[in-house]
Amino acid sequence: MAGEKKYITAEELKKHNKPGDLWISIQGKIYDVSDWTKDHPGGDIPLLNLAGQDVTDAFTAYHPGTAWQYLSKFSTGFYLKDFQVSEVSKDYRRLASEFSKLGLFEKKGHVIMYSLISIAILLSVVFYGVLKSDSVWIHMVCAMLLGLLWILSAYVGHDSGHYQAMPTRGFNKFTQLIAGNFLTGISIAWWKWTHNAHHISCNSLDYDPDLQHIPFFAVSTRFFTSLTSSFYGRKLTFDPLARFLVSYQHITFYPVLIFGRINLYVQTFLLLFSKRPIPDRALNIVGICVFWTWFPLLTSFLPTWNERFMFVLVSFTVTSLQHLQFCLNHFSADVYVGPPSGNDWFEKQTAGSLDISCSVWMDWFFGGLQFQLEHHLFPRLPRCQLRKVSPVVQDLCKKHNLPYRSLTFWEANLSTLRTLRTAALQARDAVDPMSKNLLWEAVNTHG
């Protein structure tokens, strides 16, 4: 009969979850996105991780209303036979629709403009202080300001990477390259690659790259089994060196964060010069070349090697506060093993994230990411709107008996250190480290 709908079951849909054969369901309608992976603005990782299931909530979170009109060209003509929507998802989609009608996704405020002006002022002061002053103390103050500049730049890069922070797509891409590659030396292409995977698979031990820090850190004893990273495509080997380092991770946590920036530089180079398809590879390479021109040149104007070393160390120490914040948002939240599921989007995002409570006047310092849970639920929402929607998100979590954790900066540090210490003590059991794991994981359910 003409026009009659064709149906497949959820089990049949699951079979289409491999490269070259990627099907997804959005509101019960089946789409073939196999060939879209190479052109998808968010990269291939989100499609690969969520293929073979309904992804309506994830699609709603990441795409504006205008994106729905482009779905028809991917239609297979099939519909999901046993399509169901949970009460949590219904409320989540209703809330996203209300935010859209209120124009919250478009009301970006003037945060980006103020941030860019602040960055320009800080950069001018840093250059002036280094070039015009002979005082070692002035130089150290400039190093602190440079660290602060990197923090603010990362927030601008983060914002522009999630939504159109600037009037046009071209200006938005230019802002990303300036804030990321030019000013920090960290490729926006690398950030998008890892960050999109993090959002989609929030706190999955084997799918979320933001939790995969072996040999230095392990937030769960499940890393002791040498998990295979789906993201990196390699085994995270828990060898004697990893066991030793993890055994003292609660002690080395803060010092390692200071030098963690070096790893970000290395990861940037590894990605940009890999065989992996990279959008705007040439622009990203030019961008990091700009950074590795001005930054070494700036430090070369300092009079001695000791002072140059201290300048770099102080700037790294200040910007490590931002790396710390990212850890606080997730290290002590719930973790799981396996791929993300499109059917429990709201539940996984709330379980894997925690907020850091602070006064309004400190919002600039945290870049909106103190509302980490709200950001994960609505990643396109400008940071100036996150505090406004927080009470509504809290009510929705309470309605469905889901965790909404908001800790002070001090409490979040203690919670993270407890998580690291608990895993560290388990790692010290060199005789039989796995003997207590099942009981330990049952008692310590949040990583």
Image: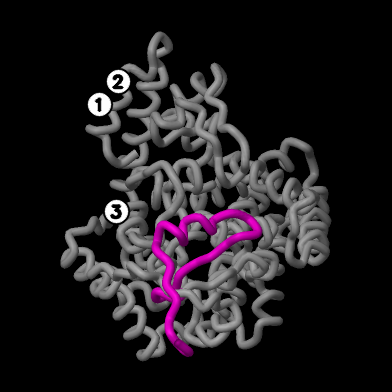
Residue named by callout 2 = 436
Q: Would residue 218 be found to the left or right of residue 393 on screen?
A: right
Tag 3's secondary structure?
Answer: strand
Q: Which mark is residue 408?
A: 3
Compared to residue 164, the image places residue 221 above or below, namely above
Q: Would residue 10 be found to the left or right of residue 160 on screen?
A: left
Please state the extent of the stretch shown in magenta in the rendering.
1-29
Residue named by callout 1 = 439
Tell me the quarter of the picture where residue 370 sits: bottom left
56 and 392: which is toward the camera: 56
Q: Residue at x 55, y 83 (%)?
A: 72
Q: Residue at x 59, y 41 (%)?
A: 260
* Rendered location of residue 1, percent (x, y): 45, 87
Can residue 185 be seen in this snapshot?
yes
Can residue 131 be seen in this snapshot?
no
Q: CA distance from mark 2 to mark 3?
A: 32 Å
Q: Would residue 124 be found to the left or right of residue 16 on screen?
A: right
